[in-house]
Amino acid sequence: MRRVAATGLLLLSITAACHHDHDEETSLVFTVSGEDTAITGYAFPPSSSNSLAVVDGWEIRFDRVLVTVDDVTLHENPDIAPTDQSQAGAEVARAKGPWAINLSVAGQVGTPPEARMASLRLQGPGHDHGGPPATGRGSAEDRSIRLVTFKGLNLRNNDKFDPAARYGLSYRLAPASASASKVNLDAAASADYDEMVQKGWTTLYVGTATFKGTSCTSGDPSYDFSTLPTTVSFRLGFATPTQFRNCQNSDLTGKAFEGEEFQRGVQVAEGRENYAQLTFHLEHVFWDTVLHDQARMFFDQMAAAATNGRVTNDDLARLDHTNFVDAQGKPLPWRSCLPDVPVASGPRRFDAGSVPLVGSSGDPAQGLRHYADFVAYQQSTMGHLNANGLCAAARQFPAPR
């Protein structure tokens, strides 16, 4: 289980009618987090065997990670279609943004230690209800961005929550908007966000990668990695509006559908604050495969594309992810600087699995054209629920489905 990062600020409260007993004591708080890595980055060497690390020896630090979130929505019956996670029942509550958020800023809002997550072990008779979480979502140490609080079903006459029901949860990664509420943006982040608005970006990564690998092994011992820069600044903007639908919830302990890791939705305990987290996984943009359970992070290929020590999406668009080359046109081999990750042989190529490829002049709606498309496709799956709950990603930009 990932350790959850913290940032925080309460923006909006959707209030319920007061004619229901105890409604004022029951709420569902949604927070937003990029986890620890949004704040601390990816250290190299990793601090522990459980820490995420870049295989080819790069340390990554983020100056800013900006996202725009909108349309946090609850649905009836998340289990309406066992073989199609994207389907759920009618909408029963919604919070409208958009909200502009810097995931790399640690907030100062702590939640009470007795607070519980929105759906932690609330699966009915025979299941352990457990105690409050020790860290992370809904705990005294949780400083995630407190985004919106529901106190009832605002699309159903402010009816109170049914504690026996699970509600489907969807939310959207939206294009930057001049009307967005800026949650925790300082002057530099606000200037970056203005550029996001102009370019229609949903997400922006700004930071620096520094090579710190030692005792590395290469798939081609004759290749001279000293030709790559050792410090690279990156500025990666993505126009990837995506709806994350009917998310699975890694806090739920009931039996999931076949092919899914966790049950879907959130469940509310009556008479208390309940917490659920919209979690963004930043590592997706550095992955080497679309197969999430096999993916590892690499950065050499981005360093090889850098111009004067800086890499952008335009630089990535010049690369073929099925056959990476360096600035001199030489095949870029694999390398591993982690002792427990064996180095692959041959030229470096990333795995698109069953996602179609259309070549550099092809239609991006039909397939991936180049490495920039590969990265954007991966980035558009970054949204989760409660750290590890997978959502059905409905891409709303030109991309293969």
Image: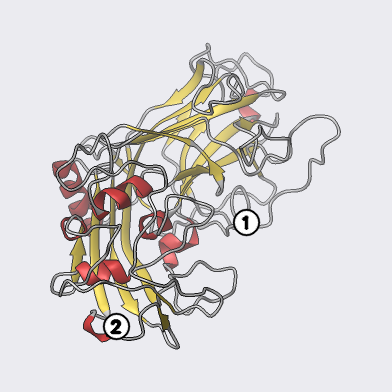
Q: Report crowding for label 1: few under 14, some 14 to 19, many 20 or more residues within 10 A (C-alpha).
A: few
Around disc 2, counting alpha carbons within 10 Å, would you say few (fewer than 14), some (14 to 19), or many (20 or more)?
some
Name the secondary structure under disc 1.
loop
User: Which quadrant would residue 275 be assigned to in this image?
Assistant: top right
Cα separation between marks 2 and 1: 37 Å
Q: Give me the residue at 23% from left, 71% from top.
A: 304
Query: Which residue is tagged 2?
Result: 223
Query: What residue is shown at x 31% (from left), y 59% (from top)?
Result: 64
Q: How is the image coloured?
A: secondary structure
23 and 355: which one is in front?
Answer: 355
Q: In the visual, does 115 lie left or right of 192?
A: right
- Residue that mark 1 sits on: 1
Q: Quick one: which residue is furthest to the top in this view? A: 157
Q: Quadrant of residue 17?
A: top right
Look at label 2 and name its amino acid. Tyr
Q: Which mark is on residue 122?
A: none
| 66 shown above or below 308 | above
375 on left or right of 33: left
SS under mark 2: loop
Position of residue 68 measured from the top left corner of the image (x, y, whole percent): 32, 41
Q: Are marks 2 and 1 in contact (CB under 8 Å)?
A: no
The answer to whether one can see residue 183 in this image is no
Where residue 21 appears, x then y in whole percent? 69, 19
Residue 339 coordinates in the image, percent (x, y): 53, 80
